Image (cartoon, rainbow, N blue to C red):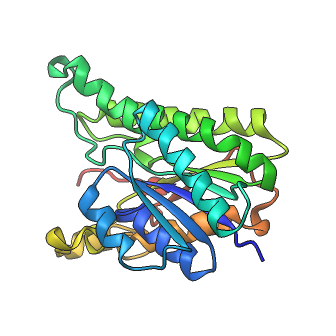
């Protein structure tokens, strides 16, 4: 029996780590790519090598992505004689949304956001498409509600995440019907419990932080991971080119200063 295969970028921390753990629990095999060597090493200790492949990869680096997919193909052939891919989750990217005032933003810093989110998603998608076509697989891009609404001084992050939304519907049209492509827009997701062990320290949330959400709490990585699993499943077989907000309802809430 061939188990489904997922490739998850940024797969050793935060939303990526939660998605890796959920899919492994549900019987998937996972290739987790992450540029943080410490986080990768910690994740690597948690599951057998036959079900989890971890690699230290900067997804914005074309050569590193190419080498990672060569390694992945070898690993697949060793374990199930198949090179097909069922799911690609483009999750990697600079997490900090604040770039500072636009008039002070260096071009090199602007490019860091664009390359980590957009270029990384492009390179991994390009490499994964042949395998995804074999299995009629799916792509899930992790965007953000910041692609749709903003706080001050977040132009680099908003532009990168907005680009992911546009890439999502473009890919859905180009790659269909063989491959479905959707995006998730997380809101406030507390990733503290999924950070590497040396930095694990869950922040305490104020009552106002929780209560401002219509669901009464901030989000958890598992909330996004569950949505990824749904979009990868046959239950979502008629969904493509869409973006789904996972934000506890905050993007639908009117907020006025009192």
Seen in the image, is 200 located left or right of residue 60?
left
Tell me the residue at 18%/17% (across/down). Answer: 103
Q: Position of residue 190 (x, y in %)?
A: 31, 67
Q: In this view, does 12 lie above or below 220?
A: above
Q: Nearer the viewer, residue 80 or 97?
A: 80
Q: The N terminus appears in which quarter of the rendering?
A: bottom right
Q: Where is residue 177 in the image (x, y as percent from the top left)?
A: 85, 44
Question: Going by the picture, which residue comes out furthest to the right?
Answer: 177
Count of all numbered marks drawn on residues in the image: 0
* Snapshot quadrant of residue 174: top right
Q: Which of 14 and 218 is in front in this view?
A: 14
Q: The C terminus appears in which quarter of the rendering?
A: bottom left
Can residue 216 be seen here? Answer: yes
Tell me the residue at 55%/74% (across/down). Answer: 50
Seen in the image, is 32 located left or right of residue 140?
left
Tell me the residue at 62%/35% (across/down). Answer: 126
* Snapshot quadrant of residue 149: top left
Seen in the image, is 227 located left or right of residue 34?
right
Can residue 161 be seen here? Answer: no
Q: Where is residue 93 in the image (x, y as percent from the top left)?
A: 37, 44
Seen in the image, is 62 located left or right of residue 108?
right
Q: Which of 76 and 172 is in front in this view?
A: 76
Q: Is residue 14 above or below residue 256?
A: below
Q: In this view, does 231 lie above or below 118?
A: below
Q: Where is residue 146 in the image (x, y as percent from the top left)?
A: 40, 44
């Amino acid at each position: 029996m061939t188990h489904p295969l997922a490739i998850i970028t940024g797969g050793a921390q935060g939303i990526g780590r939660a998605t890796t753990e959920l899919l492994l629990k549900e019987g998937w095999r996972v290739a987790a790519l992450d540029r943080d060597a410490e986080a990768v090493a910690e994740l690597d200790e948690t599951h057998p090598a036959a079900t989890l492949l971890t690699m230290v990869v900067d997804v914005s680096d074309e050569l590193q992505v190419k080498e990672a997919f060569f390694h992945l193909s070898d690993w697949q052939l060793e374990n199930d004689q198949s090179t097909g891919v069922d799911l690609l989750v483009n999750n990697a990217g600079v997490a900090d949304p604040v770039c500072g005032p636009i008039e002070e933003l260096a071009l090199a810093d602007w490019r860091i956001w664009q390359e980590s989110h957009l270029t990384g998603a492009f390179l991994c998608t390009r490499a994964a498409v042949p395998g995804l076509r074999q299995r009629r697989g799916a792509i899930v891009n992790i965007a953000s509600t910041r692609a749709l609404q903003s706080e001050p001084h977040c132009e680099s992050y908003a532009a990168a995440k907005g680009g992911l939304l546009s890439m999502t519907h473009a890919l859905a049209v180009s790659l269909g019907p063989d491959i479905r492509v959707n995006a998730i827009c997380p809101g406030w997701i507390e990733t503290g419990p999924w950070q590497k062990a040396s930095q694990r320290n869950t922040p305490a949330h104020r009552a106002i932080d929780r209560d401002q959400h219509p669901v009464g709490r901030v989000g958890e990585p598992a909330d996004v991971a569950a949505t990824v699993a749904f979009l990868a499943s046959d239950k979502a077989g008629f969904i493509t080119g869409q973006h789904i907000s996972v934000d506890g309802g905050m993007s639908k809430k009117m907020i006025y200063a009192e």
